[in-house]
Image (cartoon, rainbow, N blue to C red):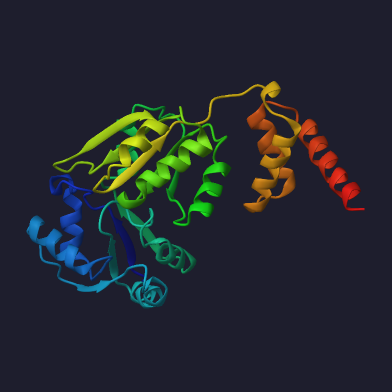
Amino acid sequence: MTGILVLAGTPIGDIADAPPRLAQELAGADLVAAEDTRRLRRLTQALGVTPKGRVVSYFEGNESARTPELVEELVNGARVLLVTDAGMPSVSDPGYRLVAAAVEKDIRVTAVPGPSAVLTALALSGLPVDRFCFEGFLPRKAGERLTRLKEAAEERRTLVYFEAPHRLDDTLAAMAEAFGADRRAAVCRELTKTYEEVRRGPLAELAEWAAAGVRGEITVVVEGAPERGAQDVSAEELVRRVRLREEAGERRKEAIAAVAAQAGLPKREVFDAVVAAKNAASASGS
């Protein structure tokens, strides 16, 4: 009989937020894979629990190499518990590779729900929560970061990002450039901790505030793009949006359909704009 993989959410700040099942799983697992074993030790001490099973590290640097070892343990019947430093494994943290490998072997995967910086920030932001998308960490290089943001400029759902404090001012400035200076946003800092702070306002205003320096764990929530009528979008802009989606890996047919839906236009109109631009480029090349 194969074992079971348990993904356990850990507190993002206040240790009192730890779910009761977390202590039970830590005490009962045959093997605990932790992003940082030192942080795990502090967590178990705070919860008053001693893991009975073996504890191993499982972080970005050894994730690929250690995954087969953990899968072998699961195949042999072990109950493997995966925890990261804060929040849910796999959400911008190690875990995805192990889950995918376990699923491929038909091993049961379950979870101990816990605190989430994404949902906490979203709920506190004051921005629409009925539809949202999580974008994780942006690229560190300025050019790649701005490109990624421009790709999301027309996304109507609320956007949630993680960011390092020392890059926050540059990221907010790039967001103001890509999304517009007046786009509403919220910077959520040190959620559930002693110095928790939620700063709300237009992106340009938040970028100016962050320029003085910000500390702590950061989650940024940005309002989705407003709906725009067809008259607001030029043929050149339609072609640009299709090209960006194609560069991101979408097939042209899907890219055209998505751009048409965003702009409130018939797909045929966007298709014609793309064909016209291609013909114009061919003519100028010849």
Residue at image location 36% in from the left, 74% down from the top: 62
State which quarter of the image contains the N terminus: bottom left
Residue at image location 84% in from the left, 47% down from the top: 281
When asked about the image quadrant of residue 44, the answer is bottom left
Give the answer, above or below, for where 229 lies relative to 9: above
Q: How many marks?
A: 0
Residue at image location 66% in from the left, 50% down from the top: 250
In-image side of 28 versus 67 (left or right): left
In-image side of 263 versus 55 (left or right): right
User: Can I make out residue 133 in this image?
Assistant: no
Closer to us: 58 or 242 = 242
Closer to us: 35 or 237 = 237
In-image side of 166 versus 128 (left or right): left
User: Can I make out residue 3 in this image?
Assistant: yes
Give the answer, above or below, for where 212 lies relative to 264: below
Q: Position of residue 102 (x, y in %)?
A: 42, 66
When asked about the image quadrant of residue 255, the answer is top right
Give the answer, above or below, for where 36 lies relative to 197: below
Q: Position of residue 51 (x, y in %)?
A: 15, 67
Residue at image location 42% in from the left, 61% down from the top: 96
In-image side of 243 versus 109 (left or right): right
Q: Position of residue 149 (x, y in %)?
A: 52, 44
Closer to us: 255 or 214 = 214
Q: Position of residue 158 (x, y in %)?
A: 45, 34
